[in-house]
Amino acid sequence: MKRNAVRVADRGWGTHRTVTAAVRAADEGAVIHVQPGDYRESVVLDRDITLIAEKGPGTVRVVAVHGPAITVRGGTCELRDLTVEGTTDRESAVLVRGGRAVLDHCAVSGGRVEIGRGSAELRTCTVENAEDSGVLVTGTAQVVAEDCVIRSTAGHGLTLSDAARAEVRRTTIERVTGCGIVLTGESQGAFDACTVRHVGDAGLLAQTRSRPLLRDCRLHDVRTQGVRAADGAAAAAVTPAAVDWEHAAAAERGAPRTRLETCEIFRTGSEGVLAGDAARLRMDDCEIRETGGAGVIATGTGRVEMDRVRVVDVPGTGLAVVEDAELRVGGGTVARTGANGVHATDRCTVRLTECEISTTAYTALHIAGNVRAELRSCTVRDSAQHAVRIEGAADFTAEDTRIERARMTGVDVKDADAVLRGLVVADTETGIRLDSRHRPLLANCEVLRPARTGVEIAAGTSALLVGGRIEGSGSAGVFLDERSEAWIEDLTIADAQGSGLVIWADARPRVRSVTIAGTTKNGVYAGDGSGGLLEDCTISATGYPAVYVGSRAAPLLRRCLVHDTDEDLSQADDAAARFEQCRTIGVTASTLPTADAGDAAGPARAAGTAGSTAGVPPTGPGTAVDLREGTGEDRLPELLAELGDLVGLEGVKREVESMAKLMQLVKRRQEAGLQPPPLSRHLVFAGNPGTGKTTVARLYGRLLAALGLLTDGHLVEADRGALVGEYVGHTAPRTTAVFKRALGGVLFIDEAYSLVPAGQSTDFGQEAISTLVKLMEDHRDDVVVIAAGYPQDMERLIDSNPGLASRFTRTLRFDDYSSQDLVRIVEHQAARHEYRIGDDTAAALLDHFGSIARTERFGNGRTARQVFQQMTEHHAMRVADLSDPDADDLTVLLPADVPAVVS
């Protein structure tokens, strides 16, 4: 007869001597009261049963004889106040194979709690001394654990695999030899107010496509990382406060999958957080401190998002990003690091917004390689080296950021491209230093109290300085090194302890509407052999003569005002400065030619010699490759000859030559005081890839520079990616920055039609076009824009905006190269690399190019260059087998070297 209340006692008064016997005799839903004692048996539960230790926790031990001590196969089975012991031979102490198991105030040791099917609830339980994971959840099983302790296991603390799910609250995992928490497969787990400590590996290991969510958790005293999103981990998902697994499973593919909220990670053996390849990880309101290595590392293709996260007191770098990883930080703090605050290299992407980086032992923000980095509304201070260092092929944008108290340079740019807008740089050694083949932009920046130079433009560097203020520099306000070509507008330089603006040998700046006041030395120091144009500038209250012009220096000062100073001009005997429509007011000793004196132009001489205290330069910094090309109409025949030497493109060459002659006439009419004819210099280049569009654009710029219609004639290449932002409000600043780098030269927009994708009228590209149209109007004499792309797509671009149609009135069509043209290109390549091509090889090449299908993948000139490269490879393999090759063997390309056509 089955009963609803059953008593078990191993001795004395009791209905049954074993738990197994009581289970067999009990009705479904029965409550079995177990008297104190040790019960050595393996109990199987397959229907609704409750087992209760009659005298409370610690009084009843169920010890496995073989296999698990407790196996649940079906029904709802509740164990209350029991001690369950496994065999310690890597078997489970409690095994759930179906149904629902509830463990309340139980102690499990000598084996794991394993849930393979069904579900389990652990309430105020202890799991310890397991040979592998303390709790293992597999398959589609689910577990809820509250107020539990998992400790002293020989493997991981809690493992979720396959499609298992867990909700864990107020649980501690400690003294395990593996990781504290492990998620693999497509498992999902929500952990609230949990602690992981004293573990032999990572606090949390998230692999593959798992979705862990940690809230209010503490991970500390771990041997390796606090969190490791392993290779392939798609690291946390969008999960509301109450876990909605269906919603989480439907989260978008790019969303974070490993998520930490209000968590603490500290005293780790290595990194605080490591996001590996393909990881997707997000942290909100967390703190990482006292790590054994970097605070956070993102590597591979990992993506990390951090909002209001503090990374402090770490012995290495605060945030490190390498390879193709991406890091986005909002409202974060990085402080007291033993290396860099942020270090990014390789091809990664970094975006920091409203962050604070302070007290770093190395450079606070170090960007290198092909990194794309943005710094917006941030504060960087107290760096033992540079505050910001950008180098290599990096592309860096900084806006509305304050930089202070760096022991070296506030912003140091080496070879990279940079846009700095609205920065305040205070109390650094040097304010900003630019040394780049690109044209960095400084817009509305302030440099305050640098110990040395405020802004330094290195040798051979072109840069744009627009707006802003430089105040209280320890030496020069702005130093333009030899051969540099800066464009400076609307800048104020005040209270420099040296000279306000120093123009070094062979520098050729263009300076407009600059105010210089209160300098200890000269207002403008034009060093030996320097030049440039200074327009509408104001200089006052200088300690030395307002303007010093060195030996052979030939700057042009136009409409400049010098006032309220002792002396306005000092020049070397062989100086060749020119002054047009300049004025002086309140100058004690004035020798500067002014408009009132009738000296509108021409060389001027004044007291003072080179080397006198009238002009004392600071020490010039290092050297760089001279990037400057000579100008003048005498170069026009040479440039036109270079154009004529181009293979094919006969129609294009005729049009460019015609435009050059027309513009030469325009210039002569202007010099004669006549009105120029209406003319738009902006062009559309319509042609397939590889037809020479970039080459002709570069020559076009040089032609205009030779005619004096552009100051530099340099080429700035851009595409949709360079002009169009990812977010609302980002496109106009990006487009403006690229445009301003092209001032004085040519802006070449490749695949320009991609700014207006077919069928997408609300695309951000429309904003880029509107911005370009306005800039082209504002700088109509300072830049030429060339839009290039497929012929069939360029008409759609021009029709997308009325402003484009009125500015691009001329289209040059670049036809595909003929087979004969392609042979000539190969012959040019061969001659350039000291190879020879005979008539028979040329004939083989002609047959080769005639056999190539002219599909969309055909590359024109690029195809010819690829063919030449393949020929040299075939030639090398052929000659390598010769024991004693002669000169012909080493240089002559044979028909056999021509590659076969791939169908």
Image (cartoon, rainbow, N blue to C red):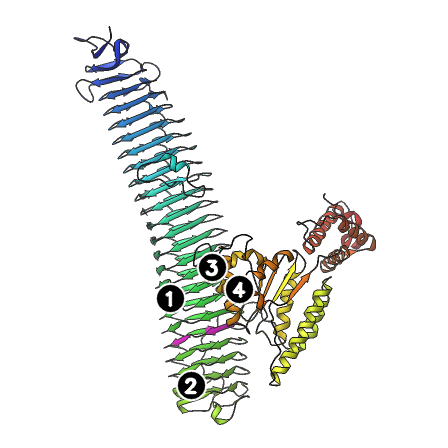
Find the magenta span and give its range: 479-493
Going from the N terminus, do you reach mark 2 or mark 3 first?
A: 2
Q: Estimate the x, y position of residue 197 in percent, counting from the top left.
A: 30, 37
Residue at which label 1 appears? 425
Pick whichever, 563 or 760, lies toward us: 760
Going from the N terminus, do you reach mark 4 or mark 1 first?
A: 1
- Residue 487 is inside the magenta segment: yes
Of helix, strand and loop, which one carries label 2? strand
Q: Give the amino acid at mark 1.
A: Val
Residue 109 visible, this angle: no
Picture quarter with the C terminus: top right
Going from the N terminus, do you reach mark 3 or mark 1 first?
A: 1
Q: Total of numbered circles in the picture?
A: 4
Residue at which label 3 appears? 731
Q: Gap in Å between the C-alphas at discs 3 and 1? A: 26 Å
The prevailing secondary structure element of the residues shown in magenta is strand
Going from the N terminus, do you reach mark 3 or mark 4 first?
A: 4
Q: Gap in Å between the C-alphas at discs 3 and 4? A: 20 Å
Q: Gap in Å between the C-alphas at discs 4 and 1? A: 22 Å
Residue at which label 2 appears? 562
Residue 531, above or below 123 = below
* Neighbour tally class for label 4: few under 14, some 14-19, many 20 plus, Cα within 10 Å: some
Residue at which label 4 appears? 438
Of helix, strand and loop, which one carries label 4? loop
